[in-house]
Image (cartoon, rainbow, N blue to C red):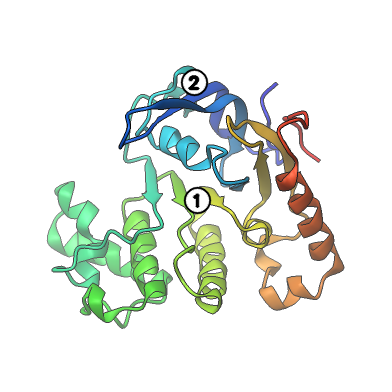
Amino acid sequence: MTAASSSGAPPKITIEGLALDYVNPDSGARHRAVEGLDLVVATNEFLCVLGPSGCGKSTLLSAIAGFLRPARGRIVMAGENVEGPGADRGVVFQEYALLPWMNVLDNAALGLKLRGVARDERYAVARRYLAMANLHDVEHKYPHELSGGMKQRVAVARTLANSPEVMLMDEPFAAVDAQTRMTLQEELGRIAMQSKLTVIFITHSVEEAIFLGDRVAVMTPGPGRIRKIVEVPFTRDARTWSRLNADPAFTAMREALLNLVRLGHDAPAQARTV
């Protein structure tokens, strides 16, 4: 049975019976990273995917992005099988991937330039999303002049400027310090609500998953599948770290998710919502 959203919103992505193989780039060895994974992501949902190292989280994201073909099963978006990368899906990785010879504005507008959008139009769009990411005053600076958190916000703005229907994020805040990470989490939550994006966010952090997600999908150890999907009871527009840290429900949910992540291979996988 597919692990479905209970939000009532129409599905944006449906994954059925997915099996994915990972090929070691050094040795060429192949192993099964994901097996029998079912999942439904609703339109405008912020879904966080959580699980132990090696469970196939990043491999799953690569397949949704179209970078990796399934060994079995299918990924469906807007009624069509995902067969490769597309402009309807934007990807933000842990690495910023900014071009060092371009300033912030040109980096943010790069995707639009590659699509042939006229200069004035692409700059107007890029400036809109830079402002949304609180970067309106640094558009003429270069990547080496920015902090790690600012670089990641430029990467987010660049992705948003391309107007994707789905944003795929692979631990994008893992390389920044704790305080910057909290700020980025709050800003991403605000941007996602303003943009009405569908977001799939990979993380190792239970706290981050609760803070950002409408639901949290917990994967089993590899080969990964969905063990359980947990609804986050806190409304997105009311989430701040000061509020959550003072809420006993946050502490209880954190402990429940930690216990799910720690479960070993012998625990039965479940594709259901709690």
Outermost residue on the front side: it is 27
Q: Residue 147: which quarter of the image?
A: bottom left
The residue beneath circle 2 is 74
Name the residue that disc number 1 marks.
197
Measured in 3D between alpha carbons, the distance from the residue under mark 1 to the one under mark 2, in whole angstroms, is 22 Å
Return the residue nearer the eye: 181 or 242: 181
Question: Considering the image in quadrants, where does the C terminus appear?
Answer: top right
Please name the residue shown 16% across and 54% down the image: 113
- Residue 15 in percent (x, y) is at 55, 26
- Image coordinates of residue 60 in percent, x first then y, are 49, 35
The tag earlier along the polypeptide, 1 or 2, is 2
Tell me: 159 left or right of 121: right
Q: In terms of secondary structure, where does tag 2 sit?
A: strand
Which-is-in-front pick, marks 1 and 2? 2
Q: Amino acid at mark 2?
A: Arg
Tell me the crowding category of disc 2: few under 14, some 14 to 19, or many 20 or more residues within 10 angstroms, Cα based: many
| Residue located 76% across and 32% down the image | 272
In this rendering, the answer to whether 21 lies above or below 60 is above
Q: Amino acid at mark 1?
A: Leu
Q: Closer to the camera, 226 or 8?
A: 226
Q: Is residue 225 left or right of residue 194?
A: right
**Snapshot quadrant of residue 101:** bottom left
Residue 7 relative to residue 152: left or right: right
